[in-house]
Structures are given as structure tokens and as C-alpha cells.
Amino acid sequence: MNPSSTWKQVWDSRTLDRSAGSILAQLMAADGLDSAFSRLGTIAWTDFVGAVAARVAITPDRSVFEVGCGAGAFLYGLDQMGCRVGGIDQSAALIDIARDALPRGEFAVADAADIAPEPQADIVISCGVFLYFPSLDYARTVIAAMVAKARYGVAILDVPDVAKADAAQQFRIEAAGGEEAYADRYRGLEHMYYERDWMRRELAAAGLTNIAIVDQQIEGYGNAPFRFNAFAFRRPPGPSTDSAA
């Protein structure tokens, strides 16, 4: 990887590999879920999305908006369920894929900090996006924008845990084939790590309640032991699965 590369350049270079299998498998590959760190099967991914949907009481009559939606892999199952879906992403290439795969969805090319508060969505989600943010101040801005758009609640998923940063980095180095290979491929492409208490405080400061910070759990996902998920609501959630996600 060129030292001058940025994460946006990485995502802008993504294309849809129609030989990857099902439509969902193709979307997952476009969204980077085919890397050495995150080789996932469609069953495990579908289970994860279903667990999140149960936790935040997503039903077919609800609308879901995703910040950093990429090619739409997370929203695909919700769209199939009948939810109204939409999202934004910095990558025009990935948004084009999402529009083609989910024609009923509403998608736009935009920065995560530029979320339009209207129209509101019942649930606002981000999955595996906060790790690409440049600072805590930027993340705080995005949280405020997500809350402003959410009618019901938010879910911030797959967040790198700062308490596990050393172990996570070692895992990534080994998975990449050693320090030299990792440095060559990912030089300049760092991840942002978060304290769980910081996330809890920011969600509370944004006016949300019923905040839950839970371990990431996706079968076969190498990064899962080093990540967490955060859920928060404007009012008490509906039926949920406490062990979900």
C-alpha cells in the first residue's frame, strides 16, 4: 500500500466481484469483509444483522439509516425484511453498488459528519466505521448527528476497544503475515480506538438512555475479540435479546 494512501482511496477502489457468490456475498466482499482479518460467511453475517435487529427492535415497518453504509451489506437483510433503508458513504463507488443492489433504498455520497437530520429514521446505525475517524472530536460530531436523525435509537457497531488495542494490533500483524508485510500494506492506514466509558458518556451527553455496551460477537470474525457494540435509545427499547450481537 502506498504510504500516501488513505482509507477513502481504499474504498473508492472497491468494485463488485460477481463471482463472489450470492448478492450478499458480493456486497460483503465489496465492503471489505473478505480480508485476512474478517473472513466471514453469509450465515454468520446474517445472524449478526438479525441479532442487532432484535436488540433495537427493528421490524418491517421501521426505517433504518446507516452512516458509512458502503455497498450495503448490513442493510441488505433489513431491506429483504421489508424495512425502509438508506445511508451515506464517502465512496461514490460503493454508493453506486448499494443503489444497484438495493433499488428501494435512499443513498447519497456524503461525509459521516454531514448527516442530514431530516428526514428522520427510526434507527440510525454505523457498523465498522468509527475506526476510520480521525479524532474523538470528529466522532463526537458524528454521534450528535446520528442522534439528531434518529427517531428511536442508535447502534454504533464494531468499535475498536482501546483496552484491547495491543492484542488487536498483534492479531492484525500476524494475520497480515508479519510486521514487514503489515507495515507495507497498511502504512498510514491506522485505526481509531475508543474507551467504552467514553462512548457511554457521549451517548448520554447526546440525550440518549438505556445505553448498553456489549462485546462484539460474530462467529468466525477475527476482529471480534477486540471490538464492542453500543446501543442507546430515546425511549425504552421494545422486545430485545440481551445476548444479541
Image (tube, rainbow, N blue to C red):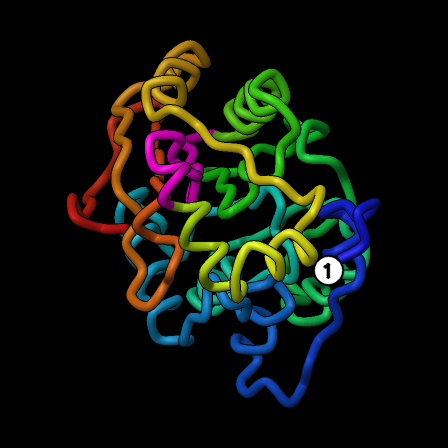
Q: Looking at the picture, does residue 118 appear above or below residue 25?
A: above
Q: Is residue 93 magenta?
A: no
Residue under the image location 29 percent in, 65 percent down: 219
Instruction: Tell me the residue that label 1 is attached to.
Output: 94
Q: Residue at x 25, y 24 (%)?
A: 210
Which image quadrant is residue 51 in?
A: bottom left
As for residue 152 lying within the magenta part, the answer is: yes
- Can residue 204 be seen by looking at this rendering? yes
Q: Nearer the viewer, residue 124 or 222?
A: 222
Answer with left or right where residue 237 lies relative to residue 63: left
- Which quadrant of the figure contains the N terminus? bottom right
In the displayed structure, 59 sits above or below 31; it is above
Question: How far from the left and from the top, in percent, is residue 116?
Answer: 69, 30
Q: Does dot 1 land on a helix, a strand or a loop?
A: helix
Say which residue appears at 47% left-offset and 69% top-offset: 80
Three-letter amino acid code at the position of disc 1: Leu
Q: Magenta region: which residues?
A: 151-167
Measuring from the top left, give residue 100's x and y in whole percent.
72, 70
Q: Vertically, is 104 above or below 62? A: below
* Residue 182: x %, y % from top left: 60, 56
Q: Is residue 82 visible?
A: no
Is 174 placed left or right of 181 in the picture? left
Q: Residues within 10 Å of mark 1 (few under 14, many from 20)?
A: many
Q: Is residue 23 left or right of residue 100?
A: left
**Residue occupying the point 74% across, 66% down:** 14
* Front-lying residue, 116 or 216: 216
Residue 94 percent coordinates (x, y): 73, 60
